[in-house]
Amino acid sequence: MMRVPLEATYPARVTRQQREALNRHRSGVVYMTGLSGAGKSTLAAMVEQHLHAQGMRTYVLDGDELRQGLTRDLGFSDADRIENVRRVVEVARLMVDAGLIVITALISPFAADRQAARARFAASEFMEVFVDAPLAVCEERDPKGLYKRARRGELKGFTGIDSRYEPPSFADLRVDSARLTPHEACTAMLAGMAEFGFF
Amino acid sequence: MMRVPLEATYPARVTRQQREALNRHRSGVVYMTGLSGAGKSTLAAMVEQHLHAQGMRTYVLDGDELRQGLTRDLGFSDADRIENVRRVVEVARLMVDAGLIVITALISPFAADRQAARARFAASEFMEVFVDAPLAVCEERDPKGLYKRARRGELKGFTGIDSRYEPPSFADLRVDSARLTPHEACTAMLAGMAEFGFF
């Protein structure tokens, strides 16, 4: 049988730099953290709409949505939360390599996991944003009724109720999502991204 | 304390259609399957280089590389292989939603997993490619020395040696990577993608 061996060296892969040049913007990750109901998903969607309208390539990784797919085998134990964050961070890495500006919207309650997430990126490509609203505000908003269910004991290990949230000490940006309107919070995010060097 | 509730309805997310319009091409997945050494990674890299040079937004999900990150907790048991494929497919879904043409380079040995992968996509966005080279050819190439290690019993559960490969019955394209040169195989892939409707 005829056969031609494959070349001994793999052909070069398209590099992140080539993708950034094609997109005409940097890639990187905006890593949000905050309580359920603090406004992460809302803010992520608003910021992405703005970036997309400017012709940027973006994606939002939303923890709640991913639990229908990539992380659907995971629960809410500490170990599962750690693995949840780990997988989302790995997907963010791939997407940053693909040239996208990735916005992650996870509670990401543990400081150690956020440090581990940061360690997977260069300093210039990982921007941590604390979407900060007090528990009382988040619980009153309760957009999905989750706090009510947690208070009734129907949800176990709910962050802020019976699972801890460790507020970040080193966030690159804090967005006071209790005092700011969504529009103001979005503006603050975009200004923070500019200052961080995204554009 | 002042506070402004977030809007009751989430702001709209950027849609896949909007991303495709921005990119000026369709997104979708080219799902390769084939033995280790059949040439999947080589072909994926060549095809991606070509697409990128045409200004398309692409990404290669390479099973071997992902085992350093997203799937590094998984081994080579049947259960772990199934989970390995599942996670990569979920990432491919996210990237297709992000507007990319994704090329997956996994052995993906089991027909049921490939069917499950296909079921996660619309028919028009999932193209299965059988990168077909006989085991004897792959074993003689042995680009990473894995077959030698498997034959010595140092690697357990190696596809083709002591773990089964189920050749696809329904591939959208078969690339005879034993007889074709890499360049010819790449040309066949691109022609197949055009016929499938990618461009």
Image (tube, coloured by chain):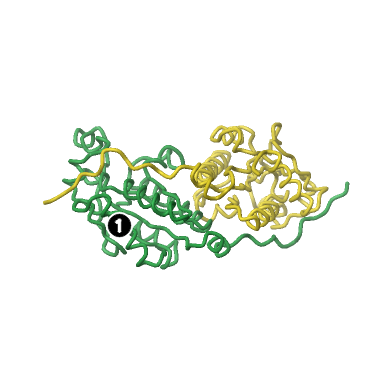
Chain colours: A green, B yellow
> Could you tell me which secondary element the residue under label 1 belongs to?
helix
Percent coordinates x, y for residue A158 in the rendering: 26, 42
Query: How many numbered badges does the structure rendering display?
Result: 1
Mark 1 chain: A
Residue at 65%, 55% in the rendered image? B54
Residue at 80%, 55% in the rendered image? A5
Of the pair B37 and A7, the residue shown nearer to us: A7
Of the pair B1 and B166, the residue shown nearer to us: B1
Figure check: A121 above or below A155: below
Percent coordinates x, y for residue A83 in the rendering: 40, 48
Percent coordinates x, y for residue A110 in the rendering: 30, 54
Residue to which mark 1 is pinned: A187
Question: The disc labelled 1 sits on which kind of residue?
Answer: Thr
Percent coordinates x, y for residue B14 in the rendering: 43, 45
| Residue situated furthest right in the rendering | A1
Of the pair B159 and B156, the residue shown nearer to us: B159
Figure check: B117 above or below A81: above
Q: Residues within 10 Å of mark 1 (few under 14, many from 20)?
A: some
Of the pair B160 and A25, the residue shown nearer to us: A25
On the picture, is B192 further left or further right than B59?
A: right
On the picture, is A179 further left or further right than B50?
A: left
Residue at 68%, 55% in the rendered image? B50
| Residue situated furthest left in the rendering | B1
Image quadrant for the C terminus of chain A?
bottom left
